[in-house]
Image: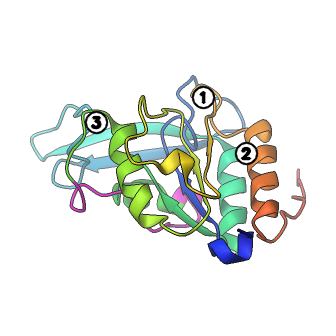
Amino acid sequence: MTALELGAPLVALDFDGCIRPLREARPDDIRVDCLYRADEYPDMFHRKPEWSRKGQSKATVYLSRVAVEWARSLVDRGIDTGWATTWQRWANMYFGEALGFTLPVLVDTERTTIASRSAEWKAAQLTTVGSGRPVLWIDDNPPWTDRTGLFNAPGFRFLMPDYSRGIDEEIITLAEEWLAEHGAPPRQPTMMTS
């Protein structure tokens, strides 16, 4: 089966540990000051912050500039890309402006039953969403078991960045090789400005 017979490739991105490395901030990171709302916050797989009397919580998060620029390049190239994150729609709500893009949500608590681990919950939904297409799933938390058969699907690839680095040049190189194999437009070199 060729890449064209499989259909357009789909890139499924996790947020925490991929776009947002779980480490101390670095000078080139993108700082995002968030004001979370209790009525607009993920209801599973997330520890609840301390809420003020108004139902708000302030937080500062840092995004990997390398990961953000690469993800933006996927969007700019017209590559089907979506969130496979426990943040679900709130990834767009809280981080979309800093990212410079929003993505369709591929995994959602409203579309499936709850699994005991986030990775199995995501895998179950990606099996359906990516049916008949090559899927590249980038996540720092792999499923313990593959009950869905996703990992054996034609064209499927799982890449696991180190959660403390997030999506880095090594992961990007592997992802770009996979994208090229599936007919996606190539990444253009970025121009660094001072």
In the picture of the structure, the residue carrying the numbered disc 3 is 46
The CA span between labels 2 and 1 is: 13 Å
Q: What is the span of residues highlighted in magenta in the rendered image?
A: 98-112
**Residue 20 place in picture, x, y as percent:** 54, 39
Badge 2: residue crowd in 10 Å (few <14, some 14–19, many ≥20): some
In the figure, residue 129 lies in which quadrant? bottom left
Q: Looking at the rendered structure, which numbered label has been put on residue 7?
A: none
Depicted 91 relative to depicted 116: above or below:
below
- Kind of residue sitting beneath label 2: Val
**Residue 179 place in picture, x, y as percent:** 75, 60
Depicted 59 relative to depicted 72: above or below:
above
Quarter that holds the N terminus: bottom right
Depicted 66 relative to depicted 45: above or below:
below
Badge 1: residue crowd in 10 Å (few <14, some 14–19, many ≥20): some
The secondary structure that most of the magenta stretch takes on is loop
In the figure, residue 133 lies in which quadrant? bottom right
Q: Considering only order in the chain, which callout, 3 or 1, is on the residue closer to the N terminus?
A: 1
Badge 3: residue crowd in 10 Å (few <14, some 14–19, many ≥20): few
Q: Camera-side residue: 193 or 69?
A: 69
Q: Camera-side residue: 190 or 143?
A: 143
Residue 106 shown in magenta? yes
Tell me if label 3 and label 2 are in contact, CB under 8 Å: no
In the picture of the structure, the residue carrying the numbered disc 1 is 25
**Residue 135 place in picture, x, y as percent:** 58, 58
- Kind of residue sitting beneath label 1: Ala
**Residue 145 place in picture, x, y as percent:** 41, 32
The CA span between labels 3 and 2 is: 25 Å
In the picture of the structure, the residue carrying the numbered disc 2 is 66
